[in-house]
Amino acid sequence: MSFSPTQQHVKGLRLFAFGLTEAGMYEAIQVSQVLDNMPIALVEQALERSTTDTNTAAANWVMQQLQQSNPS
């Protein structure tokens, strides 16, 4: 089976994010501990957009969302 470079096939999309507690246990997190408190939901939305838009368009959308939530 071959696919064209522009064709994408997605069956399901779900992002699982975990943080390590001080007790050494992993627990689900809703806000990134690495990406300057970026909501995990925003990352999920960006991944969803990347299935229908170009990577550049999805990245631009993320930048717009971040600029709106953190105006300079």
Image (cartoon, rainbow, N blue to C red):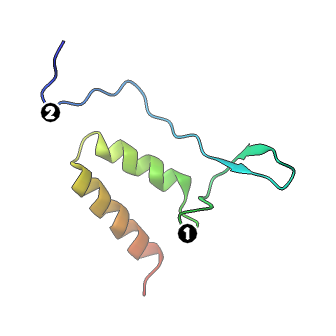
What is the residue that sits farthest to the right in this orientation?
23
Q: Could you say where residue 65 lies in the image, as x and y percent from the top left?
A: 39, 66
Q: Earlier in the sequence, mark 1 or mark 2?
A: 2
Disc 1 secondary structure class: loop
Distance between mark 1 and mark 2 Cα atoms: 33 Å
Q: Is residue 28 above or below residue 6?
A: below
What type is the residue that disc 1 sits on?
Asp
Q: Could you say where residue 48 lies in the image, as x and y percent from the top left?
A: 37, 43
Disc 2 secondary structure class: loop
What is the residue that sits farthest to the left in this orientation?
4
Q: Residue 8: name its quadrant.
A: top left
Q: Residue 72: name its quadrant.
A: bottom left
At 29% from the left edge and 39% from the top edge, which residue is drawn?
Answer: 51
Question: Alpha-carbon neighbours of circle 2 within 10 Å: few (<14), some, or many (≥20)?
Answer: few
What is the residue that sits farthest to the front in this orientation?
24
Which label sits on residue 45? none
Asked whether, in this view, residue 56 is left or right of residue 68, the answer is: left
Which label sits on residue 5? 2
Q: Could you say where residue 43 lies in the image, as x and y percent from the top left?
A: 46, 52
What type is the residue that disc 2 sits on?
Pro
At 29% from the left edge and 54% from the top edge, which residue is drawn?
Answer: 58
At 60% from the left edge and 45% from the top edge, which residue is drawn?
Answer: 17
Q: Is residue 62 above or below residue 46?
A: below
At 38% from the left edge and 51% from the top edge, which residue is drawn?
Answer: 46
Say which quadrant the N terminus sits in: top left
Label 1–label 2 contact, CB within 8 A: no
Which label sits on residue 36? 1
What is the residue that sits farthest to the bottom in this orientation?
72
Q: Is residue 18 above or below residue 4?
A: below
Q: Could you say where residue 45 lies in the image, as x and y percent from the top left?
A: 41, 49
Q: How many tags in the picture?
A: 2
Asked whether, in this view, residue 8 is left or right of residue 49, the answer is: left
